[in-house]
Amino acid sequence: MQTSSSIENLSPKAVWSYFSRICRIPHVSGHEKDIGEYLMSVAANLGLEAEMSDSGNVFITKPASAGMENSPSVLLQSHMDMVGVKETELHFNFQKDAIRPVISDDGFVTAEGTTLGADNGIGVAIILAILSDDTLRHPKIKALFTVSEETSMGGANTLTEDDMDCNLAINIDSEDIGEICIGCAGGTAYNISYTPDIREVPESGFGAVEIRMSNGRGGHSGIDINKNRLNGGGTLLYLLSALKEEGFNVCVSKFSSGHVRNSIPSCASATLCLQEHLINKFINSLQDIINRVQTKFSESDPDVSFEITRLDTLPAVMMTEESTADFLNLKSLNTKIIEYLDDGVTPLTSCSMGVARLENNICRFELLARYATDDGKAKIEKKIEDIADACHARIDHKESYIFWKPDFNSTLMKLASDEYEKLTGKKTVTTVIHAGLECGLFKALNPKLDIISIGPDIYGAHSTSERVRISSVETCYKWIVSILEKL
């Protein structure tokens, strides 16, 4: 592999130079101030009109090139924030440390031990490269860079009808070159808490066991939800529930899984207490269930590993058996897919448990439900809320964003398809994805908006295996430039 500085020599040079700079600015969701200020400085250096809203969104306007003043203006849009996921043992602070991109031997850029932030830093870099090139032919461009897309669509939710004054828009947040996305799922984010009854661990007669799961594939909780991947927290809750059904009355003392709600956690850990004379039998039964899990998921999670450790020192406190039972039943919050499209493959309605933690004697869960219909929204929300109620848990926060209804007659889609075929000799694929994009919110503000979403090849988004195909970035850039020339 080559070092991070070498990505600036990739093509298109302007795109990769901007992306390299973005990687050096911490910009995890909720902490976009520095990257917002960087975007404002780029606009100032280019002599372009720019504005930062109270919420942190950045708008940059570039006048039409000569001869295209009468063409309809176009919105180019990407989000500033990234999902921060790191390898378990890596010491890394997403609020302070720079992402370290590297070039792999197989033609990708990835990062050392963390998410790369190609979602959506590459989209931001492509727009900046277009804004900085005065040789291009294009209509008036309104560039919009939003905040908090990955957590709540917070930036998009603060936009007004006046902000959506273009009737054409290209969102650069899709992850398969040659695909044109014209619709996406909506979502409801939940923060759920459960306050268990806590007791001291008896000084005699009890023992403690720690279970660790690591090296799961993880991934995007929408795009990868149908790939049969293990969810770290959901897996440990399943293991403990299976052992409880075998008669082991375990009490949970510690539990930790996940970092963000929209990522499938690849690792998890739990500390359990039970009667000391049962521990050897418990470990044997646990290992037997783990073996079955590893066999069942050998194709989707071939590298997943589990470690069982009998602890020499007892933890100070643990949940009561009754509270542990409620806690384990909350595994059902990780519903995965509850409805498919007619093809039986494409997810329609789902929910993933992104975070499950026991902290300061309170169990906290962060979920993201996804749906493509109003009926699906009602079904998944009722299911989640019924589970929480049955387990005596509390919904602390609930926030939704709308789904983007596809327009199969989109003029912009047809133009983009023609330009891609001219550029590559290949036909495009039209998609509706099981992931959240801001396009539905934009469309709600301007029903006349003709909007598509495209992007380069990005694999493993929201996980430490995130990578972007180098050649697809150049193709995507040229594709957008050719669309702008024809508007």
Image (cartoon, helix red, strand yellow):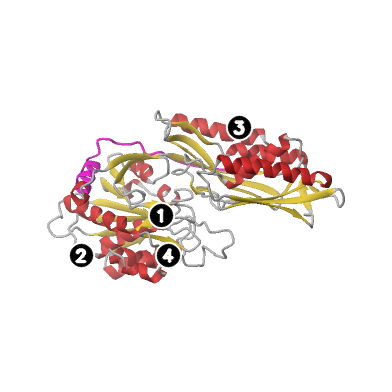
Which residue is denoted by mark 3 in the rendering? 386
Q: CA distance from mark 2 to mark 1?
A: 26 Å
Specify the farthest residue to the left.
67
- Amino acid type of disc 1? Asp
**First in sequence: mark 3 vs mark 4:** 4
Residue 480 is covered by the magenta coloring: no
Residue 101 marker: 4
Q: Are marks 1 and 3 in contact (CB under 8 Å)?
A: no
> At which x and y percent is residue 19?
36, 64
Foreground tag (1 vs 3): 1
319 relative to 16, above or below: above
Which image quadrant: the N terminus? bottom left
**Is residue 170 rendered to the left or right of residue 282?**
left
Which residue is denoted by mark 2 in the rendering? 134
**First in sequence: mark 2 vs mark 3:** 2
Specify the farthest residue to the right.
204
Which residue range is magenta in the image?
A: 395-420
- Amino acid type of disc 3? Asp
Residue 222 marker: none
Which residue is denoted by mark 1 in the rendering? 119
Q: Bin the neighbour count of mark 2 within 10 Å (Cα to Cα): few under 14, some 14-19, many 20 and up.
A: few
Task: Report the front residue among 410 and 309.
Answer: 309
**Is residue 166 rendered to the left or right of residue 211?**
left
Q: CA distance from mark 1 to mark 3?
A: 34 Å
